[in-house]
Image (cartoon, helix red, strand yellow):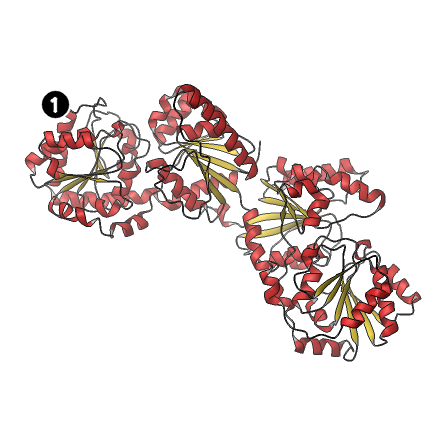
Amino acid sequence: MGSRMEEPIRILHVLGGLSLGGAESRIMDLYRSMDRQKMQFDFLVHSSKKEHFDEEIEALGGRIYRVPRFKVYNLVSYKRALKRFFAQHHEFRAVHGHMTSTAAIYLPIAKKAGIPIAIGHARSAGVAGGLKGLLTKYLRRPLKHRADYCLACSKEAGEAVYGKKWVDAGKVEVIPNAIDAAKYVYDEDVRNRMRKELGLSDKLVIGHVGSFREAKNHVFLIQIFAEIYKERKDAVLLLLGDGALRETIEKQVSEAGLTQAVRFLGNQAKVSPYYQAMDYLVFPSLYEGLPGTVIEAQAAGLRILVSDAVTKEAGVTELAEFFSLHKAASEWAAHVVENCGYERKSRLSDIQKAGFDISAQAARYEEIYRKNILLMVPMLHQGGFERICVQTAKLLADKYNVSIAIFSSEDMFYDVGDIPLIDLNLGSRPSLVGKLVNILRRIKAVKRVKKEKNIHVTYSFGPTANLINALTKVRDKVWIGIRGYGALEAKREMKLTCGRADKVICCAKEMADDVERLYGPKSVECLYNPCDTKRLGALAEEQPDAAHCAFLSEKQPLLASMSRVDDVKGFWHQIKAFALIKKEIPQAGLMIIGDGDFSEYKKLAEELHVRDSVLFTGVQKNPFCYLKWASLYLMTSETEGFPNAMVEAMAVGVPALSVNCKTGPAEILMDDYRRAAAQDAVYEGEYGMLLPVMNPKKNLNAGEIEAEEKILAQEAVKILQNPDKIKEMRAAARQRSKSFSVKAYEEKLCTWIEAAGKFD
């Protein structure tokens, strides 16, 4: 792919700082687990000083940016700094806001700058007391309307930031704080070594891991430990962490006469060995989101006494016991002393089963960080643009979150595999009033889908899907696909859809030129339909239906055509021309592959006395194992967009003999399609033959053979009677099909999707 796609996607995380805190640690666990060749994390922090994770982030390839801390009175300058930053740095796929107090300010600024995905992430279930807490709640209020994704580490955290109604309505996704659980597995050897190094071999070791701030309730923790120490003089308290209140707690410890029994160990890059050394973790927080410390301790097989103000979701195993903050410190202490004797063992599998292991959650975050693409098609019957829709979905599915919306699933032909399929169940209706009502219902349904799925790009296939797409623009980029030249003749619809679409995608250059000339859209592009030559080659090696094998082997040379029944395909021309070919080559056969009622064409073949030499295979899941038997592919369409079936036939080595209809065949069969300006002449292209266009008026009279049908027969006979020519044309056909590769199609489409970042 081009350089744009070779570079990793960049995600911007917004935090207060990069100290050794819970949210920061969880983000770093996620960062370490990502494939950084595909995705990189950058950080926007509200701190001017270098902190714990700075060096590691830069070593991993991340970038750190800084803005001033928000202090209410500097609202104007704070916004100005953010606008300046995002004006210079709008390369991010997503902005992930963990600092929810001001996320409602910076997320809209980021979106306006062109960053497609805005994420709010509730990390705490409470706020500080007093005026500061009230202000935080006020600033958070609009966040749920500003974020594309409302995430929370627990239900309680979600309710605290977005409100209970928003959570109950299912608009908040809870993603628990996950850890790299394998790092915390209990290890007896590590326990013994750490206790020896710390001089704790014969001690009762109580622990706590957390920053020194109000929410962690260190004051009460010291009171609890004082009561434990009264009962157990061998008790030691290990305090890991740092923060603004550390000096206050050190003073409290000194005044309580516990200086020799309490150890302030500060921030530790590796916490796991300290969990191994502990006998009990005491965690009396006033509020939390979902504390990773409690999960880590359980992974290490450590018992924890946890405040009942902490979400119960943290109690993954029975090792975590919840205790009321209304109970006295002595009651907490008594519970610890009574339950400190237990057998330690690893609880890794419990943590993983509960979904708290980072490997499982990394996949979900990768989905969230992907753009959401909606492909829309009326139905999935057998047909050209339906096939391209499904193929496009499968090509994009490993890079984006792709869904297909259809108006009706009736008589589905194509298998969409694992692609989410949205059946609106709004098929066609009779009468003008019914059609108008249906359009309104489709508009309502599609708008709902676009909003609920936070769609970034909607790409539609077919006139009716294009109309609904154009009328349902929400925040998505609206792309309409023009797959047949006939669509250009519906002037009213084209003017409406082209006027509202962000991009018009045509499957032929000539069509794109005419769309631009006639309707002046914002943007018009040519994107040739993809041809998966490798896959088609493999399918061609399979065996056709046994009932057809005798015909395929006996009727040689064989001419072929592939399409569902439609007058625009001109099948009567093929049958009449074939009757003339049979006179020159009696053993020849004609095969028509496709769905529909071919009874009138069967009757025409009978009247022309060639019915036994014409095979109507009906619809085939694998038509390519039939096509490989053919010596020539015939196309007699009145109009085409980009004839997929002809290119696919060429991919399995079948030379093409096509009318020079508008548009597609000349672009496929010639290096310079402009050389075939006249539609009433024969052109020998580099990759096939172009013939005069046929009379579009349907004529099933076996006694009337038109001049163009005679020309088709004459040119076919010339080729069929020249084995060297057929061999030469087969090689050219295969070579040309490679020009319409899946890779080229995918690269072009992905480049457009990546550029479609800015919402209007």
Name the quarter where the C terminus is drawn: top right
Q: Nearer the viewer, residue 133 or 709?
A: 133
Residue receiving disc 1? 704
Q: Is residue 330 above or below residue 461?
A: below
Is the residue marked by circle 1 packed among few (<14), some (14-19), or many (20+) residues within 10 Å? Answer: few
Q: How many marks?
A: 1
Question: Could you tell me which secondary element the residue under label 1 belongs to?
Answer: loop
In the picture, measured across the screen, residue 491 lies left or right of residue 573, that is: right
Residue 111 seen: yes
Q: Residue furthest right?
A: 255
In the picture, measured across the screen, residue 4 lies left or right of residue 726, that is: right
Residue at the location (29% across, 45% down)? Answer: 621
Q: Amino acid at mark 1?
A: Glu
* Residue 53, image x, y percentages: 69, 58
Q: Nearer the viewer, residue 232 or 554?
A: 232
Q: Is residue 615 above or below residue 259?
A: above
Residue 682 seen: no
* Residue 405, image x, y percentages: 45, 37
* Residue 123, image x, y percentages: 70, 50
Residue at the location (59% across, 37% down)? Answer: 114
Q: Nearer the viewer, residue 128 or 119?
A: 128
In the picture, measured across the screen, residue 261 lies left or right of residue 164, that is: right
Q: Nearer the viewer, residue 686 or 255?
A: 255
Quarter of the image for residue 72 reads top right
Quarter of the image for residue 591 reads top left
* Residue 293, image x, y percentages: 71, 61
Q: Is residue 302 above or below residue 22?
A: below
